[in-house]
Image (spheres, grey):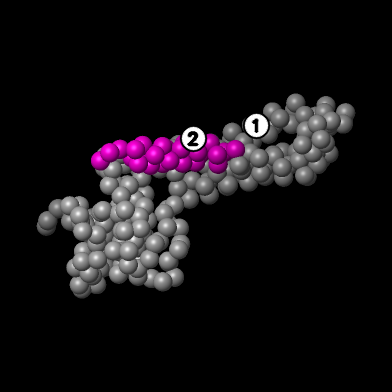
């Protein structure tokens, strides 16, 4: 109401504000409980959680409008309902995702200050590479400071994957290493073609760290299964 009327709410509307706030808060709490927004993990936020936040915002506003019609209170401007929906959803999204973003930036910053930090490049900018980057960002039990990706798909060059840029092809690893100071290569290609691993290793920067091949999630699952 304050935004809609520039801080001066007319008398007919100002009298209704206390009651409308109570109804609105009840609708918001009910929608959040139904969509289980209180059962979240701040560390493992995902797009699914973002969809749940949006669904809770729409459900709360829909329930609020339905109750207004049931009690025959139709004088509330529709623009106020729309602005409240946008502000409430944005606030819930900020509360939901800001702890994860802050944790990622703090972890990256702390890792970059370590003397034993190793500047690292991930070979493979697909699903496996993005999953590996996310796992490294969430975990603090390593010294890998990922600076970017390398991938042979030209359509991915210059793209941003998980906040890191795809810097070029695998054959360009020596150039990328000299430009970025990379001393470690992690290979994240689930179905690496024959000779691909050797090609990546030969193109990797010469150092004591070298390159490592990280198994795909499907391979990890199979290797973890007990033998029959």
Does the image show residue 58?
Answer: yes
The front one of 89 and 61 is 89
Is the residue 133 above or below the residue 194 in the image? above
Residue at disc 1, secondary structure: helix
Q: Residue at x 27, y 47 (%)?
A: 118
| Residue 78 image position (x, y, % from top left) | 78, 44
Q: Residue furthest right?
A: 11
Task: Provide residue 166's location: percent of width, then percent of height.
Answer: 40, 61
- Residue tagged by mark 2? 38
Q: Are there few (<14), some (14-19), or many (20+) residues within 10 Å of tag 1?
A: few
Is residue 155 on the magenta stretch?
A: no
Q: Position of residue 108 (x, y in %)?
A: 38, 42
Does residue 25 appear to the left or right of 195 in the view shown?
right
Residue 76: image location, x then y, percent: 80, 39
For label 1, the residue is: 25
- Magenta segment range? 91-116
Q: Residue at x 60, y 38 (%)?
A: 91
Q: Is residue 182 left or right of residue 36?
A: left
């Amino acid at each position: 109401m304050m935004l809609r009327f520039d801080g001066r709410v007319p008398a007919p509307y100002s009298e209704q504000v206390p009651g409308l706030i109570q109804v609105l808060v009840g609708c918001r709490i009910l929608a959040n409980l139904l969509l289980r927004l209180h059962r979240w993990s701040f560390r493992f936020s995902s797009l699914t959680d973002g969809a749940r936040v949006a669904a809770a915002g729409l459900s709360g506003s829909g329930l609020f409008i339905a109750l207004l019609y049931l009690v025959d209170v139709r004088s509330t401007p529709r623009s106020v309902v729309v602005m409240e929906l946008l502000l409430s959803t944005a606030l819930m999204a900020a509360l939901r995702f800001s702890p994860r973003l802050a944790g990622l930036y703090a972890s990256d910053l702390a890792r970059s200050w370590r003397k034993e930090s190793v500047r690292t490049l991930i070979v493979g900018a697909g699903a496996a590479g993005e999953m590996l980057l996310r796992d490294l960002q969430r975990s603090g039990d390593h010294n890998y400071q990922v600076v970017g990706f390398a991938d042979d798909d030209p359509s991915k060059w210059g793209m941003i994957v998980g906040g890191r840029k795809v810097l070029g092809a695998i054959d360009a690893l020596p150039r990328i290493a000299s430009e970025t100071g990379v001393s470690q290569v992690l290979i994240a290609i689930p179905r690496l073609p024959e000779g691909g691993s050797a090609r990546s290793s030969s193109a990797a920067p010469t150092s004591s760290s070298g390159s490592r091949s990280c198994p795909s999630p499907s391979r990890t699952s199979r290797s973890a299964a007990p033998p029959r």
